[in-house]
Image (spheres, coloured by chain):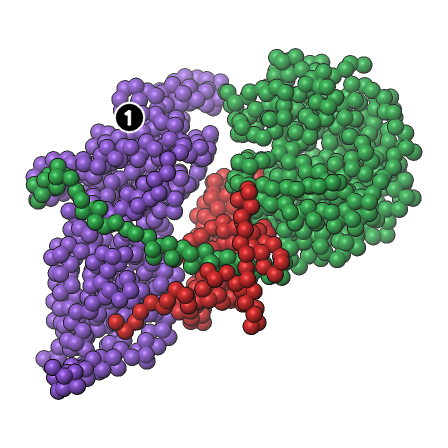
Chain colours: A red, B green, C purple
Amino acid sequence: MIFSKSKNSKQKFISCTGNNKKYEFINPKKLYIKQGKENIPIEIITDKQGFVYIIWKKKKYLVNIIEKNQNKYEVLVNGVSYPISVETPFSYKRRKYLANNKEESKIERIQAPMPGKIVEFFVEEDQIIKEGEAVLILEAMKMQNEIISNVSGKINKINFKPDDIVMKDDILIEVEK
Amino acid sequence: MKKIKSILIANRGEIAIRISETAKKMGIRTYGLKTSKEPSAYYLQFMDEIIDLTENTTDIPEFLDIDRIINSIKKYNIDAVHPGYGYLAENPYFAQKCIDEKIIFIGPSPDSIYKLGNKTIAKQLASNHNVPLLEGSNGNIRDIKHAKQLAQKIGLPVIIKAASGGGGRGMRIVENIEDIEKMLRLAQNESEKAFADSSVFMEKYVRSPRHIEFQILADHYGNIIHLGERECSIQRKHQKLIEESPSIALNEELRTKMGESAINIAKASNYRNAGTVEFLLDESGNYYFMEMNTRIQVEHPVTEMVTGFDLVEWQIKIAQEEKLTVKQKDVKLNGWAIECRINAEDVQSDFTPYLGTIEKINISKGKNCRFDTGVTEGSNINANFDSMLAKLICYGETREKAINNSLSVLNKLQIQGIKTTIPFCKAVLNHPKFKKGDISTSFIQKEMKQLYYQETDEEMIAAFWAALNHSVQLDIEDKTFIDYEKGKNITPWLMNKRLKSL
Amino acid sequence: MDINGKIYKDFLSRIERFKVQNGPEKIKKQHAKGKLHARERIALLFDEDSFEELDAFVTSAMPDTGFGKIDEAFGDGVVIGHGRINGRIVYVYSQNFTVMGGSLGAVHAKKIIKVQDLALRVGAPIIGINDSGGARIQEGVASLSGYTSIFHRNIQSSGIIPQISMILGPAAGGAVYSPALTDFVFMVKKTSFMFLTGPDVVKEVLNEDVSFDELGGAEVHARKSGVANFIYEDEENAILGVKKLLSFFPSNNMANPPYIDTKTEQEKNIDKLRAIVPDDPNKPYDVKKVIKLIIDQGSFFEVSELFAPNIVVGFGRLQGKAIGIVANQPKVLAGVIDINSSIKAARFIRFCDSFNIPLLTLEDVPGFLPGLDQEYNGIIKHGAKLLFAYSEATVPKITVILRKAYGGAFCVMNSKNIGGDYSFAWPTAEIAVMGPEGAVSILYKKELQEAEDSKKLQKELAAKYRSEIANPYIADEKGYIDEVIDPAETRKKLITAFETLENKYVDQPSRKHGNIPL
């Protein structure tokens, strides 16, 4: 065989954050983070209640993975959420290549940020809207929330009607850019 | 004078527990309501008796169902009812019904609730008693034309508010005259939904004001005192998030002046029991009466901490027609108290409610700290109720110490299973301008670039944790032994039949 | 013989030429497109050093006519062979885009046919990795003949050995049918496409501007057409996905699915299951939470997640043994059955039945989706597919009714009368001919018309109906279900029930094949 898998001990992982910052770790199981030329060890402790902490440079961080899908993780550190995708050197290259060659989608979907009830639409199909314009009101937890369009364009499709119950991430409106 | 021996607590969550604790301390038997939406709720553990309302549910939420509540009180022969905040706390009809049924309603008279609950009437009361007011519509907005005229007369920006509102619902700020039609409609809509009354009014909108409120206690004999102020300027969409007492913006002179105004409002409405008068305070020390809340407030603990009063105890004492034994001159504000509201909200995604189950919770309070909560491990946070999980109230001799105390407790407070506003509270308390006391109701929009607190290396720790878990997961999958041989061992019975079917 | 002798010299020089042909610059070319090389994919897929290549040195057929140029290359545009995945023999073909764009000519086709025949002969799974520009035009009808022979073998192998397709590049025209005939299709976002007619033709014929991604990208096939069962961000994760999927399958239809040895811990009650179904019968919840709590931790592998999400299908393990799961999803469209969800579930059930994978059904279904659109497009016919699939399946079949089981949908979702082995119900179950509101408005039509407050009366009657008619106890007492169980005990009950059914066999009337309503 010409090609074989890289050995685990040298396996490199690249963690990409939501704002495309990257952190490289070579075999994270060795439990250290490299800073400059120094390998600074990491300690992992679990307390009686089952909270997991990382101790690094004498600081304690509460860590918890709340969602995982394929190689995408949502990690809470001290209650703050970080979306992280763990890439291999190749998939990282691919990511960058695809980001440069992005074929812009013409349709922007406005999704429900939370489950709730639709109170009112401010727009109709075929209407032209501006970025930042409110398109509908969604009532959730007794509060009415304006849902704003992030793009300017034409309303292509409205998928619900007033009084409909929607779930989180339901596509409410499709806007043609 | 009638001594209260038993109380029905017509509320849930932390406030139900809070009321029950004081009542039990006073030797009063407490009754709680078990509802179909959360039949195994935490607050029920704190009640002496539980009234089960889970059978024959109706469309009306149990805590709003006046008839069922009154019937339960009569059935169990309970002396009094404490409504807490929200629900029926400011419903004059309910208070009246209690009087009709000879039940003690722990709160003001129906007449006071009605007058102060209607902002238009409340403002008239205030202006008749020389309490400063913001220029406004002096009544409800009739139509869009009227709204436009008013806006031009008062001068933009203006704010449109629900006449029978509260808690930020039915409020809209108009910055541009073109928006007025949309904003009017939104305010009316929301008001109609929330309070079944679409009437709204308009007033001048003060930019960067502070929210200052005064705690009032009034008995049946005309004695009225105030217990100093609370500052609730850290708000988002008119929802208070961090409150403190006293306020750094008040000196003794202003405190006396505003306190007198607050007492005047209470007097004008023949007020009794505990209440809160809300003012806006502008940068030059002018203050304007906003409204009076005729209930115990969420943020009441900060006042309790600096004055040493148990407000719920006084509510009950006044309800059983005891006299206020404390004079105004004896009320002293000692030290500083700060309350952080811990809500089940995703700060990083525009404070959207975060639903789920509290898997684990860990609090080490220490001295000078109070943690009022209605949830515990296993509690389910769903869309039926508001998102407040807990209130953390910390004390210090000075404001600085109170802030530091709060931060050290927040740093140790861990909740797993849901996202909370803890990182937000930390961000505010660490903010240099907050530390200086340089705050206003637009603090969050204007001063906070990031709504959550972050340690320098947090992102890297997250990146590491994900990478470590991913690599461990890959190893597990790689090493899992899948026993294909076992799958080939088929009993003769099955093999025979399978072969025959070929 | 001497290794430096003449005989070995030729042998070694050929290997040297082969190495040059598969050198780093070819790999770079693929990487520049965000794709892995055909051989890298194979390396990732198989256990270390287990892959044995076949026909590595065959060369492309020369065209009869002098039309067009053909590269002379070892192996033509495809790598074939066998290796072990988690220790088991699996056959593979992996199209090599760096040789003439992976185009398919006579030799290329012959190689694929060779592994297809071998896989069927030994009863081993086969994986096809597609990354090809399509038919090799220079070779003319030979290419078409090659494609057709591949299709024929796909069909012959169907239901005998598991066939999995990975689309890791373009697959256009005839090339799409081989994947479509296999059991599962994997795609990768942004770099894989499947369509019969490309954007150019669409533009020419219909004058519509569409991009590759809009026409046949991974997202489109996962959400809209349902052609892709799994989509991934990148190829490495997709390959991991294939390995995971394979771990649920036996090598062929005569064997049982493999086991994973689990720790033999005492099974405990799972109290969390009691809290998932909301009190309000009209409130949605996520059935995947139920699935994940019932089966072995972390073992759920969902199939066609994005297509017709109102039904959830996927594989999981109970005490290490593979099962297939079909569950209505109340979170989406209240879990109604519509055309797409019927097709999705029916195909999944037939796969499980072919490969002896027992079926667990979790039922919470208010009925079929009403409306002109559904009726015109034949919900009757498509719903019948689901009924047909459940009814013809002879693997162990167990149903748990979580909440609603109304009307026709009750019959379709694996009721005892179509051969379900065991039927359990949670106390939250509502089993009836129709939902309370609807039933009451028919039964009490007159009373409701005459009532002063008809809405209130309807509510009261509906509540009465719910407690007196639509409860699981009547069905239990009359024997239409086997037992009303405590949700916390579901896992234990299922483990025992599946154990008792391990030797299940149903004698079927002999026939060529049934006639499923297609």
Q: Position of residue B216 (x, y in %)?
A: 82, 32
Question: In the image, is residue C307 above or below residue C431?
Answer: below
Residue C512 lies in quadrant: top left
Q: Position of residue B26 (x, y in %)?
A: 74, 21
Query: B284 or C445, which lies in front?
Result: B284
Q: Position of residue B223 (x, y in %)?
A: 88, 26
Packing grade of label 1 (10 A; few <14, some 14-19, many >=20) is: many
Extreme residue in the front direction: C1
Left or right of C175? Residue B48 is: right
Q: Amino acid at mark 1?
A: Ile
Q: In the rendered view of the protein, which quadrant contains the N terminus of chain B?
A: top right
Q: Residue drawn 25% across and 47% down? A: C258
- Residue matched to label 1: C481
Question: In the image, is residue B104 above or below residue C418?
Answer: above
Q: Residue drawn 88% across and 34% down? A: B331
Q: Position of residue B22 (x, y in %)?
A: 72, 26
SS at mark 1 in the image: loop
Specify whether residue B135 is in view: no
Indicate the chain on which mark 1 is placed: C
Left or right of C69? Residue C490 is: right
Residue C225 lies in quadrant: bottom left
Query: B471 or C447, which lies in front?
Result: B471
Q: Residue drawn 13% across and 72% down? A: C106
